């Protein structure tokens, strides 16, 4: 006996494939329209050496950072991280859910519980938390329920308003550090630092916001396994539209020294999502 679902299955599959192809083409067209600049040296001032695995990146001779040599111009960032482009088109292209369904994804894959565990282990038990790139706000909502005072930051105003309205959070729009924020006890940035055009300014500004004894927890791609082919389990880290710097332990230590921060831990990581840096302000 032939059921309707047997007939519809290939039709639905074809429609799904068509949607993916359309989304891919829209994303590729958008990427091609983004104006690019030139990055001739690393954030630390080091000379860039050729990198055989990706034509867009060079390797810093000083700190080992992988540096995007054709980053988007600063004025193009609003287009890249807009509500529709970033949280819908680019997420769908990668096979990830849009922002409306991302909370469920981030809970189910364990990252929210992992982050909460990190904060319980290293962070203060109370106080003010600032999260840069808070996205859908699920982590801040959990921290708010535990009694923390929470402030989130998203570069796009529509995204910030969506998260504020749906999660009941104080979410402010703008590109950190170009935004007015109060001091905090805990500063969080998960999957953000690699997007920063000036990571040294980012970390110095984060340190300035911290009260004495305050903690910074950053999740970022760090190549610490000395692979002949860096990030071989995550080649998508070499995304020259979004990722400006991919780090090494040596480059993270340089950033910490520059920002007068003490490294508490460089040992943690979650699956292949990125490595964890925990730092403290004296």
Image (cartoon, rainbow, N blue to C red):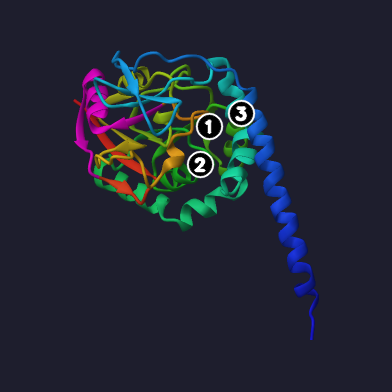
Which one is nearer the viewer's eye here, 241 or 124? Answer: 241
For label 3, the residue is: 31
Measuring 19% from the left and 25% from the top, which residue is drawn there?
282
Query: How many dots with numbers?
Result: 3
Crowding around mark 2 (Cα neighbors within 10 Å: few <14, some 14 to 19, many 20+) is many
The label shown at residue 137 is 2
User: SS for tag 2?
Assistant: loop
Apparent side of residue 71 relative to residue 87 in the rendered image (left or right): left
Closer mark to the observer between disc 2 and disc 3: 3
Specify the segment rendered in magenta.
245-267
Residue matched to label 1: 171
Residue 250 locus on image (x, y percent): 22, 29
Query: Element at badge 3?
Result: helix
Dot 3: within a 10 Å radius of its alpha carbon, few (fewer than 14), some, or many (20 or more) residues? some
Task: Decide: few, some or many residues near mark 1? Use Cα within 10 Å; few <14, some 14-19, many ≥20.
Answer: many
* Picture layout, residue 161 above or below residue 97: above
């Amino acid at each position: 006996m032939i059921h309707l679902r047997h007939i519809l299955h290939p039709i639905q599959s074809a429609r799904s494939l068509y949607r993916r192809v359309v989304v891919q083409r829209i994303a590729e067209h958008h990427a091609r329209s983004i104006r690019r600049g030139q990055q001739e040296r690393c954030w630390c001032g080091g000379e860039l050496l050729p990198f055989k695995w990706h034509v867009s990146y060079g390797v810093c001779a000083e700190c080992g950072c992988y540096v995007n040599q054709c980053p988007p111009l600063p004025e193009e960032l609003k287009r890249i991280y807009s509500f529709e482009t970033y949280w819908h088109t680019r997420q769908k292209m990668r096979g990830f859910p849009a922002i409306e369904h991302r909370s469920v994804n981030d809970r189910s894959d364990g990252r929210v519980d992992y982050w909460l565990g990190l904060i319980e282990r290293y962070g203060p038990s109370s106080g003010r938390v600032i999260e840069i790139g808070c996205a859908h706000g699920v982590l801040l909502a959990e921290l708010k329920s535990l009694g923390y005072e929470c402030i989130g930051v998203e570069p796009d105003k529509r995204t910030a308003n969506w998260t504020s309205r749906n999660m009941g959070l104080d979410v402010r729009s703008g590109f950190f550090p170009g935004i007015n924020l109060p001091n905090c006890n805990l500063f969080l940035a998960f999957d953000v630092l690699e997007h920063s055009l000036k990571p040294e300014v980012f970390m110095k500004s984060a340190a300035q916001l911290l009260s004495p004894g305050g903690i910074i927890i950053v999740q970022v791609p760090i190549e610490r396994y000395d692979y002949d082919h860096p990030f071989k389990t995550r080649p998508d880290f070499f995304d020259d539209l979004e990722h400006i710097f991919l780090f090494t332990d040596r480059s993270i230590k340089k950033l910490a020294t520059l920002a007068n921060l003490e490294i508490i831990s460089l040992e943690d990581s979650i699956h292949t999502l990125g490595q964890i840096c925990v730092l403290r302000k004296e």
